Amino acid sequence: MIQTVLELKAKKTWKWTTKTIPPLKEDEILIKTVAGAISIGAELPQYNETDLTDDPPSYPKETGYESFGKVIAIGEAVKGFKIGDLAIAFYGHKDYGVVKESKAIFVPVGIHHADALLVILSCDAAKGCLKLNPKATDRVAVTGAGTMGLLAVYFLKEYMNVRHIDMIEPRGTRGRLARKLGAETIYHNVNAYPSNYYDYGLVCSGFNKGFKFLQKSLKQEAEICILSDGNKEPFVLQPDFYRKELKVVGSSDGWDYKKHSKWYFEQIKDKSSGLRELFEKTINFEELPECFEELDTGNSSPIKVLVNYP
């Protein structure tokens, strides 16, 4: 069987490659991709060589890590999946993926593929929220109404029952969905940010400006979790950080993808959560190179891109 893969060969240079899929190992499953996603905050800096965490970049490079599909073959030792099951896995822009059973996430029947694809980043956002562990009565500020910020708001509201969540987001077009998912107030103007007001802050924007004003808005000895990849701009500690004796922690990847998925899929089952509205643009697999060009030039600026496969 032949696998089609999209690879970066150089800066802003994509190439379609084909590879023969080897026989499955006993602990592997073969997935036919039904849908995938572009995680813009992570992938666009890789595409245009602005990723501060990838210096110097190496090629060829595969990007993407959110794939949903149907299991079409299993290794002899696989027990958790059967042929025909649906799964989420981390293998990027490919029409077929081979993954270890332990790395795949089972998706129950009836879950929309757009909702299912968000389970990975939802778990990543959840880990940062759990590190802070705010009480229901605490005030929490989130910077950046992109994918990570919106998923953090959803988890804080639906899992942790936090009642007061505000969003710091300069783009006026991104307030509606943040409110729908649980944010109370969306601050678009930096001069309107409250000072010394919040107990906790989550950095979900890759830009230092949001981090700067978050430090201003926190109370004495409050705590910050950085969920951003840190791949766009360096984050600078402000005088407020030292004066208020703030604390900062980092968070990367998810706390436990399979355990989180059980809560997440039960939470969104038979409900209109609004999460799939993060996918503001939908394309087909073969349109990926053109879509990255549009994203890079600014002709298209969705929160997230859904990719349908034939």
Image: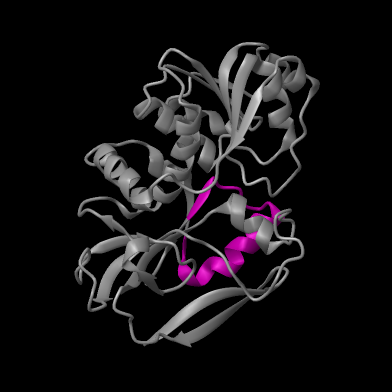
Q: Is residue 112 left or right of residue 183?
A: left
Answer with the quarter of the image where residue 240 lies: top right
Residue 246 located left or right of residue 254? right
Q: In the shown orientation, is residue 69 left or right of residue 218?
A: left
User: Which stretch appears magenta?
Assistant: 283-305
Question: Quick one: which residue is furthest to the right in this view?
Answer: 239
Colouring style: one colour
Quadrant housing the C terminus:
bottom left
Q: Which x, y percent locates residue 61?
A: 62, 71
Q: Where does the image place residue 306, in percent across and percent down from the top left?
A: 45, 56
Can residue 177 be spotted in the picture? no
Residue 304 on the magenta segment = yes
How many marks do you count on the picture? 0
Residue 180 image point, x, y percent: 42, 28
Question: In front: 93, or 132?
Answer: 132
Residue at image coords 38%, 47%: 256
Residue at 76 percent across and 15 percent down: it is 243
Going by the image, does 58 lie left or right of 73?
Answer: right
Tell me: residue 242, above or below residue 301: above
Q: Quadrant of residue 78?
A: bottom left
| Quadrant of the rendering where the N terminus is positioned | bottom left
Kindly tell me whether residue 86 is visible in this rendering. yes
Which residue lies at the image location 33% right of the left edge and 36% below the top edge? 273
In the rendered image, the vertical position of residue 178 relative to residue 71, given as above or below = above
- Decide which of 82, 131 is in the foreground and name it: 131
Where does the image place residue 27, in percent across and percent down from the top left? 30, 73
The residue shown at (38%, 26%) is 160
Q: Say if 195 sits above or below 37 in the image.
A: above
Is residue 222 on the magenta stretch? no
